[in-house]
């Protein structure tokens, strides 16, 4: 196993004056999630065992059944305990954490391809019991997004199904998801969805990333979970693999970042008209981006962009002026197939680490060594 260490230096302007700041993300042989090279599809993070630090959940099973794994943080950002999630192996594409039964701890929703999607309830100490299923039992699930879509105080589940209707599974407040409705067009090849109030009316809308040269859309919520009005973003023939939403230019309107296959990644800036006609290309030399996330990784108060690529290095774009200027940094020289990438504080120092989900490679993470 190769040891990787990469450090980046940066001098930049922030706020009213000049601040010297060194942006540094560091990886080494110890900063990995097990020694496995599995068909990892996604990764999620949260305090699974209730001890105050962030643990990590890894979803394995792209196309072939794999074992989903829980990695327990020792408090310093090192994962010295590992547990299997469940006894069965399945074709899992997503494992997401949220308090689904409203008892104060984090439960797990598991999305499987052509196998039932399952709920695992937490006993409060990081021990999980499978409690039921949600959505169509044998659909082509590719992603899960969790959030209180109907704003009734509990967490609902959105399922993106490639080549089949997408599903909204509404929580009854106890972790049961018997009420299901579809969203988007049944022909949509949806691979990712984000939940956000995109037009400022107080209702949560849906931002869809569609593959297979299909248009991407924002579906607006009428307040009654009716998503009849939509507006496109992109060229109309994109192969978008992932989307992220944040107000990057701090104008009060959410912006959309797309990770695309076979074309550059793009930022689409929101407006008071609810349209996304103004855009900016991000990373013209990246042609196969599978994942994107937004987070303040350099600790300067604005949102940066993290991109996970296939067969080219993963990168961070530092926001250098409320979305008007971006500085690109490469995490390592390695060119893995990164299917998911997220940010979370793993060692409790207030800075966000970056975690990669790599298919057929080691899953690893980077300690944030930025000097503030």
Image (spheres, grey):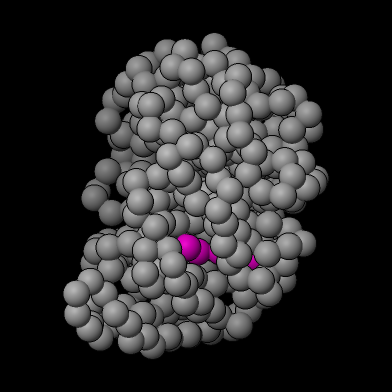
Residue 366 visible? no
Q: Quarter of the image holding residue 302?
A: bottom left
- Outermost front residue: 273
Residue drawn 34% across and 54% down? 250
Quarter of the image where the N terminus is located: bottom right
Is residue 40 shown above or below 153? below
Quarter of the C terminus within the rendering: bottom left
Point 35% across, 51% down: residue: 251
How many numbered dots are placed on residues in this image?
A: 0
Residue 46 magenta-drawn? Answer: no
Residue extending farthest to the left is 16
Name the side, left or right, on which 274 lies relative to 372.
right
- The reply to whether the magenta stretch includes residue 307 is yes
Q: Which residues are magenta?
A: 305-309
**What x and y, as percent, mark residue 343?**
42, 59
Give percent across and percent down for residue 136.
Answer: 68, 20
Q: Residue at x 33, y 87 (%)?
A: 11
Q: Which residue: 68% across, 64% down?
A: 264
- Please name the predominant secondary structure of the magenta segment in the image: strand
Place of residue 226 in the rendered image (x, y in percent of width and height, measured from the top left): 54, 16
Rendered location of residue 182, percent (x, y): 64, 19
Q: Residue 319, relative to residue 137: is it above or below?
A: below
Instruction: Classify residue 76 by image quadrant.
Output: bottom left
149, 247: nearer the viewer:
247
140 lies above or below 357: above
Work out whether residue 184 can be spotted.
yes
């Amino acid at each position: 196993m190769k040891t990787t260490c990469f450090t980046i230096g940066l001098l930049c302007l922030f706020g009213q004056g000049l601040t010297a700041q060194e942006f540094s993300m560091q990886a080494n042989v110890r900063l990995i999630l097990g020694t496995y090279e599995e068909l990892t599809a996604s990764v999620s993070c949260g305090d699974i065992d209730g001890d105050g630090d962030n643990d990590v959940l890894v979803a394995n099973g792209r196309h072939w059944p794999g074992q989903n794994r829980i990695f327990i943080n020792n408090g310093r950002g090192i994962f010295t305990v590992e547990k299997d999630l469940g006894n069965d192996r399945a074709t899992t594409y997503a494992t997401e954490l949220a308090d689904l039964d409203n008892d104060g701890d984090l439960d797990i929703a598991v999305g499987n391809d052509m196998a039932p999607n399952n709920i695992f309830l937490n006993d409060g100490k990081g021990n999980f019991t499978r409690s039921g299923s949600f959505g169509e039992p044998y659909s082509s699930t590719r992603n899960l997004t969790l959030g209180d879509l109907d704003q009734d105080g509990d967490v609902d589940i959105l399922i993106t199904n490639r080549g089949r209707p997408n599903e909204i599974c509404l929580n009854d407040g106890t972790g049961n998801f018997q009420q299901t409705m579809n969203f988007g067009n049944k022909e949509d090849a949806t691979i990712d969805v984000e939940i956000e109030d995109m037009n400022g009316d107080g209702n949560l809308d849906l931002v869809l990333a569609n593959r297979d040269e299909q248009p991407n859309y924002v579906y607006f919520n009428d307040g009654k979970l009716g998503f009849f009005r939509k507006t496109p973003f992109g060229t109309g023939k994109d192969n978008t693999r992932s989307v992220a939403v944040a107000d990057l230019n701090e104008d009060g309107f959410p912006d959309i970042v797309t990770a695309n296959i076979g074309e550059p990644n793009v930022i689409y800036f929101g407006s008071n008209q609810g349209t996304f006609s103004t855009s900016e290309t991000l990373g013209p030399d990246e042609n196969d981006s599978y994942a994107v996330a937004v987070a303040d990784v350099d600790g300067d108060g604005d949102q940066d962009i993290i991109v996970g690529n296939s067969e080219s290095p993963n990168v961070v774009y530092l926001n250098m002026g409320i979305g008007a200027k971006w500085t690109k940094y490469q995490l390592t020289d390695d060119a893995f197939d990164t299917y998911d990438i997220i940010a979370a504080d793993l060692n409790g120092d207030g800075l966000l680490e970056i975690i990669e989900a790599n298919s057929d490679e080691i899953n690893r993470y980077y300690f944030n060594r930025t000097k503030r």
